[in-house]
Image (cartoon, rainbow, N blue to C red):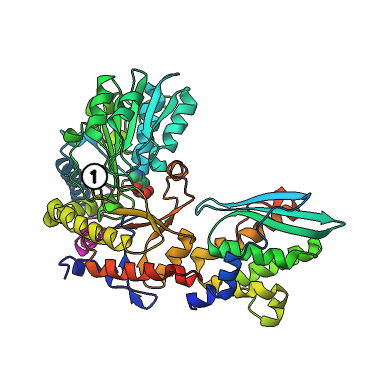
Amino acid sequence: MGLEQIYSEILSEHNNSKRNKHHIDNPTTVLKGVNPSCGDEIELELRERDGVIEDAAFTGIGCAISQASTSIMIDLIKGKTKEEAIELSKLFFGMIKNEITDEDQLEPLDEAIALKDISHMPARVKCAVLAWHTLENAVEGEHAANHEH
Amino acid sequence: MNPYLDDFPVLKEPMNGKRLVYLDNAATTQKPLSVLRAVEDYYRAFNANPHRGLYELSVRATEAYENARHQVKEFIGADKDEEIIFTRNASESLNLVAYSYGLNFLNEGDEIVLPVSEHHSNLVPWQMVAKAKGAKLVYLYPDATGHLTEEEINSKITPKTRIVAVAHVSNVLGTVNPVREIAEKAHAVGAVVVVDCAQSIPHYPVNVKELDADFVAFSGHKMLAPMGIGVLYGKQELLDKMPPFLSGGEMIEYVYEQEATFAPLPQKFEAGTQNVGGALGLAAAIDYLKQVGYDTIMKTESELLRYMLDGMAQIPHITVYGDTTGATERCGVVSFNVDDVHPHDVSSILDADGVAIRAGHHCAQPLMRYLKVNATCRASLYFYNTKEDIDIFLASLKKVRGWLGYGA
Ligand SMILES: Cc1ncc(COP(=O)(O)O)c(C=O)c1O
């Protein structure tokens, strides 16, 4: 596997960049995502209009993997419909669970594919999926909360 | 060469293609061959349900189990075998005291005093008691080196105090708490003292008389024994007046349709079939610890601790929590952070070099908040660690920031 790949440039770049880490104007949804066992804590802000995620950003603290995963996700979902965002999250969970490995199928995940090898690091899976779970809950409403992947 | 290494087969398991450097001893220790053998021998040669069968095999199992209890009693300097209750772990022991003593002998307005550094196991059960009884939790806050000062203790323990719950050694900072002084103060106001020895007994001699403790809890698995066996010591006069914690088989005397009478100590608190294999493993662990000797354990660990703290001080961008000067008594538990790097990333990076450390809140969220950190890394020592282990740990630690694209 190689930890090198996981902590590749993309990750450290994202971790260092504050590009997506801020508040947005007039968010329509603000939702907190927490991994209590490790203390990762993010707050995702979305602004939707006519079913489209017009803007997104996050605040919070966490490890490089959770922060990078969140930031990459935000790049991906901006301008997408809610349905498209949910599709992406399903694809991401499939990749992290090592259920979807086909490169073509994963293509829509773009930069998030850099996190593929986390599927071999069970201890870190929850860091990678935190943002995506939070997104799912934000879009589908609280009833979808707390299901484990 | 460390003479004990050969007794611990796990320590020879390769990890990520490297030699395992096990520095998570505060979470659980590895088990020596003699402990593994004791458990195996039990299941091979005399497994039977103790206290129940009237045949030879069961009598032998009962004897072995009761001998293990006697050995624990001797080891911690208790008066009577009846004062030793076998549980699953320290958490269960502390819950037993909270449910059986706390819920029955506390009243509204009473105060439970405890350090903010307590493990959740010695904190959440007291929150439960406080909520149920309208009692109040009063916290002791440590000074900058992690120590509880006399003024802090004297100002918080008052005539309202009914229980003082305190860890002998902190699982985050390695601080040795002044249990004896706390107990003296607590007893002067008529409070009972519950001491969590989970992190002390693996490294320090624990004598319930010297600590002047009313209850003492610890886990076997942190002191070389198998998981699933723990101990609660309680003074007989307290245990006698407490109702059973769990009920069912083994802990009764006579059972009628509407009521039952309970077995005497210690069976009153040991409902259901017990972990006899675990108790024998614990007895073997005690033998092993005695053979190594606490003097050797403490000397080895304090040398390694000094070496580790000195090495860490040479690496830039590292913050160590608690006492780093060696000015005060301290165990080989070191909590630290690397600037700009989350503890989880530190732990994953060290893991790639075969180094096992803990990262997270260490079941001490109130302390984390008090220290104003979200989480820490924690490296914890045992007598089977070596200088070479520390060298590998330090070399790996030096590389951490580079991995994440920061300068050294
Ligand atoms: C100080 C302290 N108390 C209690 C516990 C709980 O031990 P166990 O999980 O074995 O019940 C631990 C271990 O994590 C500990 O370090």
Question: Which of B240 and A122 lies nearest the eye of the viewer?
Answer: A122
| Residue B34 drawn in magenta | yes
> Does residue B263 show up?
no
The residue drawn where x is 19% and y is 58% is B303
The image quadrant of residue B266 is top left
| Residue B406 drawn in magenta | no
Q: Would you place residue B51 above or below residue A144 in this image?
A: above
Q: Would you place residue A99 above or below residue B314 in this image?
A: below
The residue drawn where x is 20% and y is 35% is B211
Q: Is residue A142 left or right of residue B27?
A: right
For mark 1, name the chain.
B
Q: Is residue B157 left or right of residue B345?
A: left
Question: Which of B353 and B126 lies nearest the eye of the viewer?
Answer: B353
The image quadrant of residue A72 is bottom right
The residue drawn where x is 31% and y is 73% is B13
The image quadrant of residue B126 is top left
The residue drawn where x is 25% and y is 29% is B183
- Percent of width and height locating residue B162: 35, 23
- Image quarter where the N terminus of chain B lies is bottom left
Q: Residues within 10 Å of mark 1 (few under 14, many from 20)?
A: few
Q: Amino acid at mark 1?
A: Thr
Q: Would you place residue B53 above or below residue B356 in this image?
A: above
- Percent of width and height locating residue B172: 36, 48
> Does residue B99 show up?
yes
| Residue farthest along the right direction in this orientation | A50
Please provide the residue range marked out in magenta.
Answer: B31-55
Query: Quick one: SS at disc 1?
Result: loop
Residue identifier under label 1? B328
- Percent of width and height locating residue A92: 66, 68
